[in-house]
Image: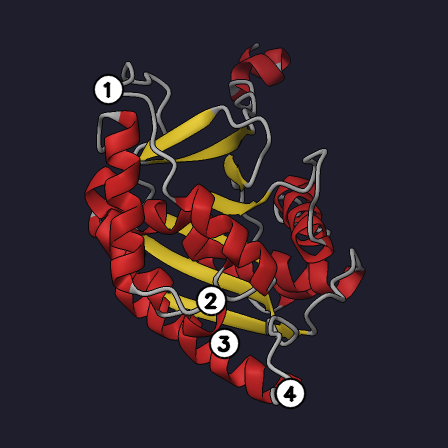
Amino acid sequence: MTLADTVRAVGRWFAGGEQEPEPDPNALGTPERAMVVMAHPDDAEFVCGGTVARWCAEGSEVVYVVVTGGDKGTHDPEMHPEKLAAIREEEQRAACRALGVKECVFLGHPDGHTIDEEELRGQIVRLIRIHRPDVIVTWDAFRRGFNHRDHRNVGILTADAVYPLVRDRLYYPRDEEDGLPSHEVNEVLFAGSEDPDYTIDVTDHWETRLEAVLCHASQIGGRTREDFLRMREEMIARQGHDRMEERFRRWSIRRSPPPPREAANPQARS
């Protein structure tokens, strides 16, 4: 996420939800393991930080995968890419500690140059096979409006990795040779969607998310805790309630179970 993206996201970040929505009978619940695949340090905190905070508080093991170093996200004329990447990596690690994230993997690709290509796709497949998440959160690559190329390509790469690559053992066979069997991910939440259809209530975890956002000092344009608290108070006054939620487009991959052995080979019973 660029600095300009981040400043725009600050305003959207305090959007509240409807008051007391009806319970969703198809809600995901708390995953045992989850993975968040994002383009830049700070992306996750703005689009799913409350969800991550909630899942971690409820016992999930959450792993971050950050594809680029975010080494272009500054207007400071004295800054250079290597220094900025080091600053942003430490900011992201601090945010992960605030949220309770188990591990953060940095792939180190240059900011703004992410492409849909074999090597990076294989890196994501391998990490999914290592960590074996139940749910993955990533960028929605298919939004119609403005979309950062890194967000778009990371969303495409991750969706392709989930289906069918990580599931089918003959894709990237070196993984199996290294003792990493195939894995099925049945749920993906796409962040930043123009057409979200799934919400997660993060009201009880917004302060934890705020702590994580504040870790990204290089990206929040000098805003302070007091600035965010004032925005929160204004949102409550405007909407008449304090509910906060994060919105996603949900992709559920429902696979039919294999037929019973007897049905698959009826002659075996005779």
Residue 59 position, x and y percent, is 22, 50
Whole-angstrom CA distance, mark 1 to mark 4, is 47 Å
The three-letter amino acid code for the residue at tag 2 is Gly
| Viewer-side residue, 34 vs 146 | 146
Q: Give the residue at mark 4.
A: 80
The type of colouring in the image is: secondary structure
Q: Give the residue at mark 2.
A: 221
Kindly state the secondary structure of the residue where label 3 is placed.
helix
Q: Give the residue at mark 3.
A: 88
| Viewer-side residue, 83 vs 77 | 77
Kindly state the secondary structure of the residue where label 1 is placed.
loop
Q: Residues within 10 Å of mark 2 (few under 14, many from 20)?
A: some
The three-letter amino acid code for the residue at tag 4 is His
Q: Quadrant of residue 236?
A: top left
Whole-angstrom CA distance, mark 4 to mark 2, is 18 Å
Residue 84 position, x and y percent, is 56, 82
Foreground mark, 4 or 2, reads 2
Whole-angstrom CA distance, mark 3 to mark 2, is 14 Å
Whole-angstrom CA distance, mark 3 to mark 1, is 37 Å
The three-letter amino acid code for the residue at tag 1 is Glu
The answer to whether marks 2 and 1 mark residues whose Cβ atoms lie closer than 8 Å is no
Q: Is residue 51 above or below residue 245?
A: below
Q: Quadrant of residue 210?
A: bottom left
Q: Is residue 201 above or below residue 221?
A: above
Q: Quadrant of residue 214?
A: bottom left
Tell me the residue at 59%/59% (across/down).
4
Q: Is residue 195 above or below residue 224?
A: above
Residue 182 position, x and y percent, is 58, 50
Q: Is residue 60 above or below residue 96?
A: above
| Viewer-side residue, 266 vs 131 | 131
Answer with mark 4 or mark 2, whichever residue precedes in sequence: 4
